[in-house]
Amino acid sequence: MSRVLVVDCGSSTVNAAVVHDGDVMSAARRTCPQIVPPEAPMGREWDPEQLWAVVCEAIRAAAGDTDVDAVVCTTQRLATVFLDAGGDALYAGPNTDARGFAEALELEARVGERLYDTGGHQPPIVLAPARLAWFRAHRPDVAAAVDKIVPVSDWLAFRLCGELACEPSNASDTGLLDVSARSWAIDLAAECGVAATALPPLREAGDALGLVTSTAAADTDLAVGTPVVVGAGDTMAALVGMAIVADGEVGIVAGSTLPVAAVTSAVVTDPHRRLWRGCHAVADRWLLEANGSECGLAQAWFATLLDVAPEEVHTLAAAAPAGGVAPAVLGPGPLDFSDLPLLRAGELRINLPLAQLGPTRAMVARAFVESIAYAARHCLAWVGEATQIDAAVALGGGMAESPLLPDVVASVLGRELRCHDGHVTVRGAAACAEVGLGNQPDVGAAGRTLAGRGRTVSPVDEWVETYAAGYQTWVQTWDRLHEGVARFSSLLDVADTAEGRT
């Protein structure tokens, strides 16, 4: 195995790591702040040159004097860059850039079914076509200059070697890829106002892309001529890092959000349209994905309320018994006297019992950790309705290093779990680089070499029954909350119609 430099760009941090034989030898993290454009309160973007400077700083700090054998990039999915005809970045936006919300509503009404049936994603709020439509409406000068649309990781590879290409797992999250064919959906792109010429050539993860240029070498201190290999989206790289590469295998990536993805050997459609379809980093595999929404991001917010560091939430939670506080909305709410008893077993419904029972900070923290596992199980159930799950489930990502979460997830699922550490994304990206260097025959094989790095976690016997009941309560609570949201949305629709708005 080689010494591979991995660049992993997230929402506000850039991580660089040197990986050898699956082990992280050195690493560095740098921050790149997001900008809120004054004309787009829901918008988020980076200054492209500032982002590149931060990436270069992270590379220099991680690599040091190490002679690396290859470089590979992975970044958060949905993050997008617009390039002009000279290859300069006009715009770089993270996955949270929702400036195109209004434009997305128009796209959804006009081509929403095709976006899902062909591209496998809905709604189009943060997809590239909605962002470009926003620029056409608000910054026509920028929109007119857009020559290429490219995911951030592929843009970073372009900055390193001067070769522009787009990898299918990343392209899946533009909304412009025909996922089944693993090729650009030219007709759909045209309907979305995107020219075919704006879509770069497609190259599979693990392909040798180019060599570090003299300009990039001066910026990063990498050696001129260092091979640059095509990477993948961060979730797909994490799945490779957990050896989730074969049909029927499922990975839970507990990071900023909570993707739960099953590998399929053919494209599978969810009749309920709740799941995303996309391309895996493995060339002949696809993914069917549910998402448990914000995970690490929610934990950071929750830790502030508990007055602990984010990584201490799970340590605090471990001091509480299983199922001590069931998931609930802990605060004022309408009291339905027809729904008795007011305090159901394991479910807090009103304030008075909350005051009497006095759950501790540890119990509330544990309820948060347990809710992560309940959300993962619910996502897994959705995925299981659409495709066969044949293999053990794997858990990875930064939150998988918790002293508590793996045991809770295994107990909530009632099945063994293969647990990996927080380095699965960089490890999976490095596996792609090993293919480009000729050390592995393909990305699937490279992922399978990493399978032994996980540890087996079994359910805790005395928790299983408690969590079986707790999960049912969680589902009922979730369904009621969802019903309330649906009713509120219906009221808004009625109000808009009455006032002549659409």
Image (cartoon, rainbow, N blue to C red):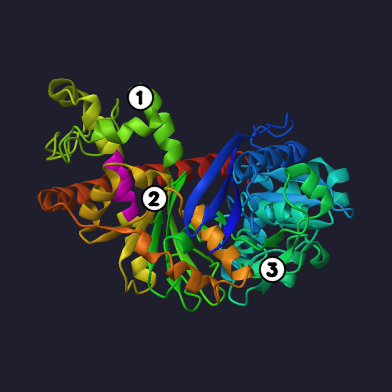
Q: Amino acid at mark 1?
A: Val
Query: Disc 3 versus disc 1: distance between alpha carbons?
Result: 45 Å
Name the residue rendered at 15%, 37% in the picture.
321
Tag 2–tag 3 contact (CB < 8 Å): no
Q: Main secondary structure of the magenta part?
A: helix
Secondary-structure class at tag 1? loop
User: Which residue is disc 2 drawn over?
Assistant: 421
Query: Disc 2 versus disc 3: distance between alpha carbons?
Result: 28 Å
Tag 2–tag 1 contact (CB < 8 Å): no
Q: Which residues are magenta?
A: 369-376
Answer above or below: position of 448 versus 372. below
Toward the viewer: 220 or 466?
220
The percent position of residue 59, horizontal first and vertical second, equals 65, 44
Q: Amino acid at mark 2?
A: Asp
Q: How many marks?
A: 3
Q: Amino acid at mark 3?
A: Ala
Secondary-structure class at tag 3? strand
Query: Disc 2 versus disc 1: distance between alpha carbons?
Result: 22 Å
User: Which residue is disc 3 drawn over?
Assistant: 208
Toward the viewer: 481 or 410?
410
Which quadrant of the view contains residue 339?
A: top left
User: Which residue is disc 1 drawn over?
Assistant: 308
Answer above or below: position of 284 versus 483. below
Tag 3–tag 1 contact (CB < 8 Å): no
Specify whether residue 209 is painted magenta.
no
**Left or right of residue 150, residue 433 in this image:** left
**Left or right of residue 332, residue 52 in this image:** right
Secondary-structure class at tag 2? loop
The percent position of residue 183, horizontal first and vertical second, equals 67, 73
